[in-house]
Every structure is written in structure tokens, then in C-alpha cells.
Image (spheres, coloured by chain):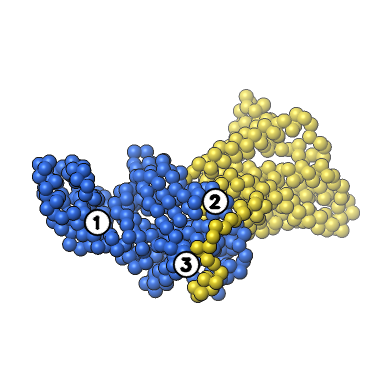
């Protein structure tokens, strides 16, 4: 169980994470989606007590993370597979954590076996590991304390297609036995196959949150107006669900006619109004990514 | 493969409680982290080897009457005092430069407990490092006594041993303090060596600062630790003042940084 309530993180004038709230229930895999720099990692670091939030709270297994007496036994965390001392062997990395948490050393062997790093690979220093191997080591590390909750930041990065398939099976199995999984990715396709729920973040804000079925099916319409802010207020007052797209576009869960009526009622000038043809989520995600690409190019 | 997982764990099991890892466990882990990397391992080996070299040089270079257990032992404190603090520095800075802090603080979110464990681990290492120094000096002195009857005096005192331990521990904690304050291996190591040296040179050169160096230059205030007499109240006070400046102040500021810094 993970619950996040109004988490906000500001760095000076820049708001990295803005009023983010969501929940992850036992037995589910939640995909945390967003382009690079959208605030996924910052949110995950706040949940795991590594970054103090500017405001808001979060709980894991019923408590703020920092109050868990032995966090590794309840929450498996993988935030960055590259953040390991290159001079330690794979086995040593796991052994140190097993010791800290008071887990027997046979657990280290079990997990090396599980992630396919048993044998000579375990005795090699992490310096010589490929990103895929580091990712596997990180997954073993997250599992070592036998937790009920997993928080994984971009765990598929660097894994080959077979590795990604394997990891999906591992996470699905974990959730099916009652575990809670939160995993982030900047690729929709990557989490689509395993997630039950999706939380989409863009520019530090949650832009979509629901079951995969809901979000992928939802079409809605895409509307652009000269004054999107006023239109948005009017649409919301009319009881319509509005999410933000790129270039000031709004994605509205309604028929085009309803949106047109609202626009006419406030004499808004529309410059685009059309149904979202592919899945609304994909549209939303692409616009988010496009906006980010533009940001980087600038 | 996942079958074994199913047998060993049930994520949905009713609420379980897990005891907090105690400080002894955390200290053990921190000690292991100092020795399980190449840098840590070779620093320890280098310290031991240089001790051997220092003692060997005395066998050939020193006058036989000066080839005593006390002199040989005290000369081994030089590599201990110079190299072990680097271990103290690295024990904190590597967490940041190698980004292992991400794991360390995710597993132990109460950062002050990690700081305590690191402090205990370095103190322990400072104490234990005296043992090989004693061994090397003893072998050297036995050889010296065998080569020349005028050499090989064994006289030694508990006070000297105690002071040697204190000297070693103070040096390594000093390293830890600088490591916590600067949070970067290269910066902390360079500053650890350069700043006190520049300070020594300045206070020796500038006439008006002479009295300052008597209180705040560790190389000056630690000299009485190598003499065969108990420290006087004044000497203790001067030693404490220099430790306050070089160890306590950076240590406290470093601890504040460690507790506050965002881990990413």
C-alpha cells in the first residue's frame, strides 16, 4: 500500500512536483508514466524519504517511510541501478543490504539465482557490469528484504527485450500474490503490458490517473482555444473532466458538441476541436513528450 | 525461479513487525564497507607496509641506542596518522561520489544512526590499527636487539600506548569530519592535507600568530602525546582547543549537512 497526498517539491522558483496525489493498492501494479524530467524520480525520492517534500505527505505500508523501523523488509526500492560502488562485487552489494536488514545470507544466493547473476557474475565488480546487469542486481536488491511493496524507478532501462519480459513476469507474479508495485517509465508501451493502473505525470502535475482500461479506452476530444485557461474553468464548471495537453490543448472527456456548447456560452474562440482518434492516453502522452522535446531543444 | 519466491514469501501476509537494525549491526556493516572496496583494502595494506618500511629504515639509519621499541612504535604512528584518515574521509564521501547514499539512506532513513555507526566504525578502526603497529615495532626491535646489544630497549608504558590510541583515533575522526563536511572524496582529501599544512606554515611564519599555533595547530598540540610523561592540564586544554577547531567544528557542520542534504 502506497498513498501519496498533495506532494509538492519546489526548487527555488521551479516547481518539480506540484500537488501530486495517488494511491497504489495491494495486488496491483501501478505504472508511473511521464516524460523525462516530469517529476517521477523526485516523487519517488519523496516517497522513500530521501528528498524532503516542500509540502504534502506520503505513506508506505501505513506509515511515513522514515518511520518504518526496518524499511528494507517492507519496501523494496530501486531508484537508480547505477548508484552502486563500482569497486564492490555484485554479491557484496547484496550481502551488505542483507546484513543491514538482518536477512540471512542464503537469501543473497536465492536472489542472485533469481535475477540470473549467480556464478562468476556475482563475483565480478559492479564496474564491469552492463546497465542490464546493474538493473538485475538492483531488482535483486529490492527483493532482498522480502518486502510487500516495490518502488522501482525505470527498472526496464538497459534490459534487453527478454529481460523486460522476465521482469514483467516477476512483477505480475509479485502483485498477484498481494504485493503492491509502483514502477515508473517514460515509455507507455513498456508499462502497458504489466500495469493495472496508470498515473501519468507531466510538468510535475498528475494529468491522468485511473485503471489502464479506463485510460486507454477513453477517447474524448482535443480542443484548443485562444484563451485555454478561461475555457478550462468553464468546462470544469460544466462538470466535464479536463486534462492538459501540449501547446495549450485540452483533452476533454465529452462529446465535441458539449465542448462546443460550453465554448459558445462564454464566447470563446476555438482554434481546434476534434475527437482524439487513438487512445486518449497515447495522445496525452505524446503531447507531453513533444512538449518536453521542445523544451530540451530550446 | 519464481517458484522459490512463492514458497519463501507471501507479500500479502498479515501485518508483520520488523525490529530496527541495532547500532552494532550498522557499525559492522559500515566497517565492512570500509574494507570491501579496492581503495579501502589497499589503504589498509599500504598503511601496514609503510609501517614495515619505516621500522626497517630505523634498523639501518638510527643509532643503536635509539633503536628502541618505543621509537619504532611511535614511528609507525606516522603512516597510521596520515593514511587511515583517508579511510575515514572515504567512508562518507564515497556514499555521495558513488551515490550509494541512495541505498544507505533508503535502508536506514534515520541518517543520524548512519552517522553514529560511521563514527563508531572509524573509532574502532583507529583503535585496532594500533595492533599491527605494535607487532611491526616488536619484530623490528627484536631484530635490532639481535644485531646490536646497544639496541632493542623494550621499555614502554601504558600511558604511551593510550596516547598512541588517542592520536590514531583523533586523526581518523578528523578525516570523517572533513568527509562529512565536504562530501566529495577529492576535495575532502586535498583539503584535509593542505589546509592544516598551510595553517601550520602561516602560524609558524607570522610572529603574531605564534601563540595561536600553540593552541590551534594540531601538529604542535599533539607533540606531548609522544613524550613519556602524562599531559599537564594546560597541554590537555591546548589539545582540546585544536581538536575543537579541526574535528568538532567541521564534524558538527558536516553532520548538519549529512542530515539535511537531499539524496539523488
Quadrant housing residue B149? bottom right
Question: What is the x, y in percent for residue A24?
Answer: 41, 56
Write the residue at 24% across / 50% down.
A241
Q: Chain of mark 2?
A: A
Quadrant housing residue A165? bottom left
* Label 1 packing within 10 angstroms: few (<14), some (14-19), many (20+): many
Judged left or right of residue B116, residue A247 is: left
Give me the C-alpha separation between circle 3 and circle 2.
22 Å
Q: Chain of mark 1?
A: A
Earlier-in-chain disc, 3 versus 2: 2
Camera-nearest residue between A7 and A184: A7
**Chain drawn in yellow:** B
**Mark 3 touching mark 2, by CB under 8 A?**
no
Residue underneath mark 1: A284
> Which shade is chain A?
blue
Could you say whether the residue bearing mark 2 is in a helix, strand or loop? loop
Tell me if I can see residue A213 in this picture.
yes
Question: What is the x, y in percent for residue A253?
Answer: 21, 54
* Label 2 packing within 10 angstroms: few (<14), some (14-19), many (20+): many
Could you say whether the residue bearing mark 3 is in a helix, strand or loop? loop
**Mark 1 touching mark 2, by CB under 8 A?**
no
Residue underneath mark 3: A177
Give above or below for A103 relative to B155. Answer: below
Judged left or right of residue B78, residue B259 is: left
Q: Are marks 1 and 2 on the same chain?
A: yes
Q: Chain of mark 3?
A: A
Q: Which mark is residue A68?
A: 2
Give me the C-alpha separation between circle 1 and circle 2.
37 Å
Give me the C-alpha separation between circle 1 and circle 3.
32 Å
Amino acid at each position: 500500500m502506497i498513498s501519496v497526498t498533495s506532494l509538492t517539491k519546489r526548487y527555488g522558483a521551479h516547481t518539480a512536483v506540484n500537488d501530486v496525489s495517488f494511491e497504489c493498492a495491494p495486488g496491483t501494479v501501478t505504472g508511473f508514466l511521464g516524460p523525462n524530467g516530469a517529476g517521477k524520480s523526485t516523487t519517488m525520492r519523496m516517497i522513500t524519504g530521501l528528498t524532503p517534500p516542500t509540502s504534502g505527505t506520503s505513506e508506505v505500508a501505513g506509515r511515513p517511510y522514515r518511520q518504518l523501523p526496518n524499511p528494507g523488509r517492507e519496501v523494496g526500492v530501486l531508484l537508480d541501478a547505477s548508484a552502486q560502488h563500482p569497486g564492490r562485487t555484485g554479491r557484496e552489494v547484496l550481502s551488505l543490504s542483507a546484513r543491514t536488514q538482518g536477512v540471512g545470507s542464503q537469501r543473497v544466493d536465492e536472489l542472485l539465482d533469481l535475477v540470473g547473476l549467480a556464478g562468476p557474475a556475482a563475483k565480478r565488480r559492479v564496474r564491469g557490469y552492463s546497465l542490464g546487469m546493474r538493473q538485475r542486481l538492483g531488482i535483486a536488491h529490492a527483493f532482498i528484504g522480502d518486502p510487500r511493496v516495490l518502488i522501482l524507478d525505470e527498472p526496464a532501462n538497459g534490459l534487453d527485450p527478454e529481460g523486460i519480459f522476465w521482469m514483467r513476469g516477476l512483477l505480475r507474479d509479485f502483485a498477484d500474490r498481494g504485493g503492491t508495485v509502483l514502477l515508473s517509465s517514460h515509455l507507455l508501451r513498456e508499462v502497458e503490458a504489466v500495469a493495472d493502473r496508470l498515473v501519468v505525470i507531466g510538468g510535475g502535475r498528475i494529468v491522468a490517473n485511473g485503471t489502464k482500461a479506463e485510460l486507454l479506452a477513453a477517447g474524448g476530444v482535443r480542443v484548443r482555444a485562444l484563451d485555454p485557461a478561461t475555457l478550462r474553468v468553464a468546462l470544469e464548471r460544466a462538470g466535464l473532466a479536463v486534462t492538459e495537453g501540449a501547446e495549450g490543448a485540452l483533452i476533454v472527456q465529452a462529446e465535441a458538441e458539449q465542448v462546443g456548447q460550453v465554448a459558445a456560452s462564454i464566447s470563446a474562440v476555438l482554434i481546434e476541436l476534434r475527437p482524439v482518434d487513438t487512445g486518449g492516453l497515447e495522445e496525452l502522452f505524446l503531447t507531453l513528450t513533444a512538449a518536453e522535446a521542445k523544451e530540451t531543444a530550446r | 525461479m519464481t517458484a522459490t519466491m512463492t514458497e519463501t514469501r507471501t507479500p500479502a501476509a498479515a501485518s508483520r513487525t520488523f525490529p530496527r537494525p541495532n547500532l552494532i549491526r550498522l557499525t559492522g556493516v559500515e566497517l565492512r564497507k570500509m574494507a570491501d572496496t579496492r581503495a579501502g583494502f589497499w589503504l589498509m595494506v599500504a598503511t601496514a607496509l609503510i609501517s614495515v618500511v619505516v621500522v626497517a629504515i630505523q634498523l639501518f639509519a638510527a643509532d643503536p641506542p635509539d633503536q628502541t621499541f618505543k621509537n619504532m612504535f611511535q614511528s609507525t604512528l606516522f603512516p597510521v596518522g596520515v593514511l587511515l584518515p583517508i579511510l575515514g574521509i572515504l567512508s562518507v564521501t564515497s556514499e555521495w561520489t558513488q551515490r550509494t547514499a541512495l541505498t544507505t539512506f533508503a535502508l536506514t532513513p534515520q541518517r543520524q544512526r548512519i552517522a553514529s555507526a560511521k563514527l563508531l566504525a572509524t573509532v574502532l578502526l583507529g583503535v585496532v590499527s594500533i595492533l599491527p603497529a605494535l607487532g611491526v615495532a616488536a619484530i623490528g626491535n627484536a631484530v635490532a636487539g639481535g644485531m646490536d646489544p646497544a639496541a632493542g630497549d623494550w621499555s614502554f608504558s601504558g600511558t604511551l600506548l593510550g596516547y598512541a590510541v588517542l592520536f590514531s583515533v583523533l586523526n581518523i575522526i578528523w578525516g570523517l569530519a572533513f568527509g562529512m563536511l565536504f562530501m566529495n572524496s577529492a576535495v575532502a582529501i586535498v583539503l584535509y592535507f593542505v589546509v592544516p599544512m598551510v595553517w601550520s606554515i602561516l602560524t609558524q611564519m607570522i610572529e603574531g600568530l605564534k601563540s595561536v599555533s600553540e593552541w590551534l595547530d594540531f601538529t604542535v598540540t599533539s607533540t606531548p602525546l609522544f613524550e613519556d610523561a602524562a599531559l599537564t592540564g594546560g597541554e590537555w586544554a591546548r589539545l582540546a582547543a585544536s581538536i575543537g577547531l579541526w574535528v568538532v567544528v567541521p564534524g558538527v557542520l558536516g553532520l548538519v549537512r549529512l542530515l539535511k542534504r537531499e539524496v539523488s
